[in-house]
Image: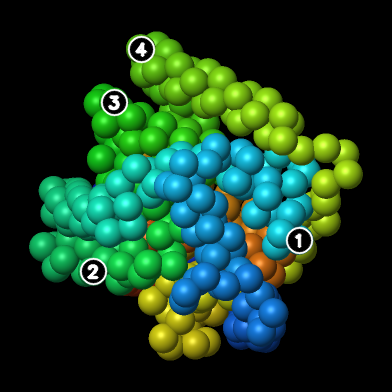
Amino acid sequence: MTGAASGWNRFAGVPRPAAAAVLALLALMMVWGVAGGVGRDHIAVAGPVSARLDEAVDDHALYARIAERVAAGEPYYAAAADEHRRGNYPLRPFVTVRLPTLAYIVAALGERISMALFLLVGGAAIFAWYRRLRIEPGLPLAAAAVGALFVAANLSQLAARDWLYIHETGAGALLALALALYRPERPWATMAIVAAALAIRETLLPAAMLFGLFALIDRDWRAAAGWVAVGLAFAGGLAAHIAALAAVTSPADAASQGWNGQGGWAAYLSFVQATSALRFVPGWAALLVPVALLGWAAWRSRLGMAMLSIQLFYAALFMLFARPSNFYWAMLVVPTLFVGLVFAPAALAGLVRSLLHPPRLELARRSA
């Protein structure tokens, strides 16, 4: 699979200097990851004095207890504020307290049905990616099956009870489905799913903004208006969240220590390893994540551009701001990250070919 025939492979036929630069950058990222010591040194795992509820610990237990109290009839914000105080969690600024959507879902449906609901979303994402890769021109049928397998392997937390209460789990599954369904000419399904994901985790706003930017670039004013409507609805919901939280907190409540982890590349790779199927094969994140990003960079398409932009944005976010205890943030993008490996063999083949056998246009220029 070279990708040359269909034209999807951005790295097929690139000039030799460009091929050398990309391969050098790939090698640098791998060496940097290996030297950085990917693993638990960059992850804050639960300790013996962590908050616990059955098998749930730390943030898992915090959000599980809040949902449990909401199910018992308590108001969300009163229960959340009380649990944050009891567990010595900060209540300021407002982003330290999650939006109430997930707690309401679990309280209304119960754990089992809520898990089944998110498993259904995950199954839909797996099927949607299989179908999307199957109909893309130039890709063999095996690519669809392998890509769907990567999505399935990295959605496995959906089957774990304690991960139900981590908001990034459900939001990441919804984003994976929204991306597979994304088509510029028919953005409505993606728009609705992204809106649902935003209601669970507000950190998905950059992805929504990217889709809105694409609509503006395409001068699709209806789609742009739809994304603006999503943004306005989100802003209204966030304002209501801030007001409701302010009613149950005071300046005396604990404030967050901030988000300035600055863990760098090794921390990002560690987050990916801890939340993906690579947790079973420690060390491989340093090698496979750069290759997956290369694969996304190779796919010359609107979806390929969207995927690369989202992956790089959140990678930068994790490297700069996430603390070791925020490692589960990576679950927003992990479900789709390794689909990029589907495109990587053709990308590498094109780069190596250009390096060893420069394109004819380059040779012609040299001979002239």
**Mark 1 highlights which residue?**
88
Q: How crowded is mark 1: few (under 14 residues within 10 Å), some or many (20 or more)?
A: few
Q: Which residue is drawn at 17% across and 54% down?
A: 127
Instruction: Identify the secondary structure beneath mark 2.
Output: helix
* Residues at marks 4 and 3, CA–CA distance in whole angstroms: 10 Å
Q: Tell me the CA gap for discs 1 and 3.
A: 42 Å
Q: Which amino acid does label 3 sit on?
A: Trp
The residue identified by callout 2 is 149
Sequence-first tag of 4 and 3:
3
Residue 357, image quadrant: bottom left
Distance in Å between CA atoms under marks 4 and 2: 35 Å
Judging depth in this view, the residue of 190 and 131 nearest the camera is 190
Residue 23 appears at what percent x and percent y?
A: 52, 71
Front position among marks 1 and 4: 1
Q: In this view, does 128 lie to the left or right of 357?
A: left
- Where is 331 relative to 211, above or below? below
Q: What colour scheme was applied to this rendering of the protein?
A: rainbow
**Mark 1: amino acid:** Asn
Mark 4 lies on residue: 222
Closer to the chain start, of discs 1 and 4, is 1
Q: Name the residue under label 3.
A: 188
